[in-house]
Image (tube, coloured by chain):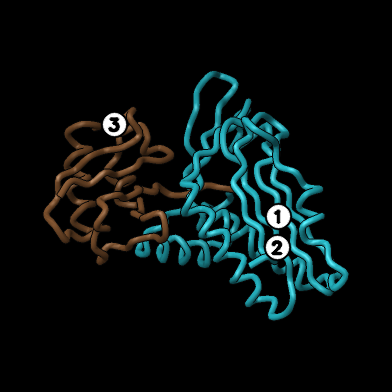
Amino acid sequence: MKLRLTLFGALRDADPRGFIELDVPEHSTVAQVREALQHHVHRHAPAISPSLIQRSAFASEDEILHNHRHVPENGELAILPPVSGG
Amino acid sequence: MTDIYTAVVDVVHAPLNPPAALDFVSDPRFGGIATFIGRVRQHNLGRTVTGISYDLFEPLALRIFQSIGERARREVGGPMKLYIAHAKGDLRIGDLAVVIAAATPHRDEAFRACRLAIEAIKHEAPIWKQEHYVDGHSAWSEGCSLCEEHREAELAAVKRDGETRGHQH
């Protein structure tokens, strides 16, 4: 399935469009998406450090999705680097 | 719930509005109002800052503000009104970044609810700060990981080292 990952904060530098599209198997877990994203970023945005991806969380519009969760059926995910509001 | 107000305010349209926060939480039941106002400051970690930009994942930020409000209500354990608004976009020195107001019957619960809300926003809400420096460079702030395994490690480090090192934002 095709996933669209919306970028925020320092991860916006990974793609000037503000999102990354990845092809992943149906019912992939967030951990598998993280792995696929590491490969994608390594090839297409090498300036982004792997540890930033490692410390980033994935989320839908409703909640944070931890590593064991499956990707949403609508194929929309946000990648949230470490947060710094306030 | 009408006793918790949450907002993300795009500063292109309007600045944050502390009097609106006081109006929202004011209620004849409440004798104590605690407010926290965060402003853009001129220096950070020894560098001169000219402005900052806030990036937010707005739908999730609003949900998390609401859940923080509900946590504050459980902590207070009685009637409370809470206002949480965070700025989005490009801010200059002195501009308002966040406004929180908590009102309760007495001061202790108001201070506690206000403190809980600002700390939770800093550590849990999907908001990112980019600082712009006088030399023309910009940098995204380090921040707190929302991943469960990294969160646990970071919170343990804070507990071990206190707030004096590595967790000053």
Element type where label 2 sits in the image: strand
Q: In the picture, one chain is brown; tell me its letter.
A: A
Report, in whole angstroms, how far the alpha carbon at label 2 lies from the one at label 1. 7 Å
Colour given to chain B in the rendered image: cyan
Q: How many marks?
A: 3
Residue at image position (64%, 32%) is: B13
Give the image quarter of residue B84: bottom right
- Tag 3, which secondary structure? loop
Residue drawn where x is 50% and y is 44% of the image: B56
The kind of residue tagged 1 is Ile
Q: Which mark is residue B127?
A: none
Dots 3 and 2 on the same chain: no
Tag 1 residue: B100
Q: Position of residue B113 (x, y in %)?
A: 69, 67
Q: Secondary structure at mark 1?
A: strand
Residue depth check, mark 2 versus mark 1: number of the one nearer the observer = 2
Q: Quadrant of residue B16?
A: top right
Give the residue at x 70% y 49%: B99
Query: Dot 3, crowdedness within 10 Å: few (<14), some or many (≥20)?
Result: few
Q: Which residue is mark 2?
A: B82
A50 or B125, which is in the foreground? B125
Q: Is residue B162 above or below residue B41?
A: below
Lower position in the chain sequence, tag 2 or tag 1: 2
What residue is shown with label 3?
A47
Kindly give the residue lying farthest to the bottom in the view shown: B77
Same chain, labels 2 and 1: yes
Distance Cα–Cα, label 3 vs label 2: 42 Å
